[in-house]
Image (cartoon, helix red, strand yellow):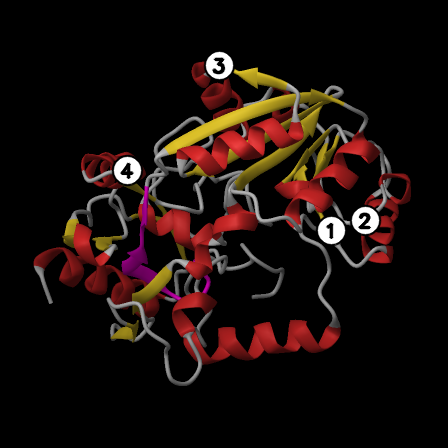
């Protein structure tokens, strides 16, 4: 083990001996996300740095405390980027926090989620052992892929000390078209486009306007833009728009009561609370609504989706309730990886 990892190991073993739970923390950009913040803070930002990066292999390995800005700057020099567009929420999150939160930006439906880019990970467990999952190459993993399990776990299984990610080449051309239409018209248009061979990389709607982003070869992008029509958006304005969605900096996100509905992209708008903003080609609906927690979750569940209380008080819990069998699976996993309840107690689910 290197010095930084040894120091983390000592902190973990000390906390275990004293029976003092730990609250894992990077840059704090996602302190609002999750059920509760409990335990003695353990700052992971010092354990940082790029471990390995080979542009020709499209793989990057870095330690958990590495700032996202450092990773993206390095990738940009080789014309590459993180295809899942991790949100920064106006700050500079750590790579460990990016993976542990499992959140993705507007490109997710076309490029994939965080878990689709994680090739391998190292986990510092409560007993001080470093568990290694996956690898640093793009190939199928035999058996259960624990690396993906860590995505979105909010650190309840241990300290994600190192991660290997697949990266993508930056598209040669990227253009955005803007069209006037209602929310139902936008959802229908997004789903039609999803079934066509066009280089779609973003589809969102807000304030009566649909935004369509196309990325790829110049000829394919030009043909797609011509086929959908609408108004071409200047590159700087388009970048600002998509970044406002990616980093949750759009004015919508300033509301004190905000719901995030994850639903099938084809879900009818009239079956759900009126959306204030639509992303992911219809699969992500943001709603400023004071309807009860039960009402929101009933509406989302009726169309096969879930409702998360993004902003505002959440007496019934921030996340959508899990089915009993799924909840039991979460409990068994927590018991296996962290039987002493040392890491981020109650952050993902009450009682875990």
Q: Secondary structure at mark 2?
A: loop
Extent of the magenta region: 155-169
Q: Is residue 176 magenta?
A: no
Q: Quadrant of residue 158?
A: bottom left
Q: Which mark is residue 267?
A: 2
Q: Secondary structure at mark 3?
A: loop
> Which residue is depicted at the point 18% across and 50% down?
55
Within-10-Å neighbours for mark 3: few <14, some 14–19, many 20+? few
Q: Return the residue nearer the eye: 171 or 243.
A: 171
Residue pointed to by mark 1: 263
Q: Position of residue 155 (x, y in %)?
A: 43, 58
CA–CA distance between discs 2 and 3? 31 Å
CA–CA distance between discs 1 and 4? 30 Å
Q: Are marks 1 and 4 in contact (CB under 8 Å)?
A: no
Between marks 4 and 2 in the image, the one whose residue lies nearer the viewer:
2
CA–CA distance between discs 1 and 3? 31 Å
Q: Is residue 161 magenta?
A: yes
CA–CA distance between discs 4 and 3? 23 Å
In this rendering, is residue 275 above or below 54?
above
Q: Earlier in the sequence, mark 4 or mark 2?
A: 4
């Amino acid at each position: 083990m290197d010095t930084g990892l040894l120091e983390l190991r000592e902190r973990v073993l000390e906390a275990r001996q004293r029976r003092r739970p730990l609250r894992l923390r990077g840059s704090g950009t996602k302190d609002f996300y999750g059920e509760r913040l409990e335990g003695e803070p353990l700052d992971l930002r010092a354990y940082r740095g790029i471990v390995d990066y080979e542009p020709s292999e499209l793989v990057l390995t870095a330690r958990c405390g590495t700032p996202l800005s450092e990773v993206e700057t390095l990738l940009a020099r080789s014309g590459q980027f993180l295809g899942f567009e991790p949100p920064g929420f106006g700050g500079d999150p750590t790579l460990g926090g990016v993976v542990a939160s499992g959140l993705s930006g507007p490109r997710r439906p076309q490029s994939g989620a965080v878990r689709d880019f994680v090739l391998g990970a190292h986990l510092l467990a409560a007993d001080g052992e470093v568990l290694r999952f996956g690898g640093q190459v793009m190939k199928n993993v035999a058996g259960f892929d624990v690396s993906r399990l860590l995505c979105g776990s909010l650190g309840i299984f241990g300290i994600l000390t190192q991660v290997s990610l697949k990266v993508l080449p930056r598209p040669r051309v990227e253009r955005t078209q803007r069209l006037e239409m209602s929310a139902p018209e936008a959802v229908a248009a997004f789903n039609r486009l999803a079934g066509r061979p066009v280089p779609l990389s973003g589809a969102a709607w807000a304030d009566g306007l649909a935004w369509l982003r196309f990325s790829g070869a110049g000829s394919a992008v030009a043909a797609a833009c011509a086929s959908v029509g609408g108004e071409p958006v200047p590159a700087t304005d388009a970048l600002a728009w998509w970044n406002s969605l990616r980093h949750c900096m759009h004015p919508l996100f300033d509301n004190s009561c905000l719901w995030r509905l994850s639903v099938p992209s084809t879900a009818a708008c009239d079956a759900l609370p009126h959306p204030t903003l639509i992303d992911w080609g219809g699969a992500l609906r943001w709603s400023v609504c004071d309807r009860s927690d039960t009402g929101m979750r009933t509406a989302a569940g009726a169309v096969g989706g879930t409702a998360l209380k993004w902003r505002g008080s959440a007496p019934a819990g921030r996340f959508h309730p899990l089915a009993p069998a799924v909840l039991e699976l979460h409990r068994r996993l927590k018991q296996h990886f962290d039987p002493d309840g040392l890491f981020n107690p109650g952050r993902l689910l009450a009682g875990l």
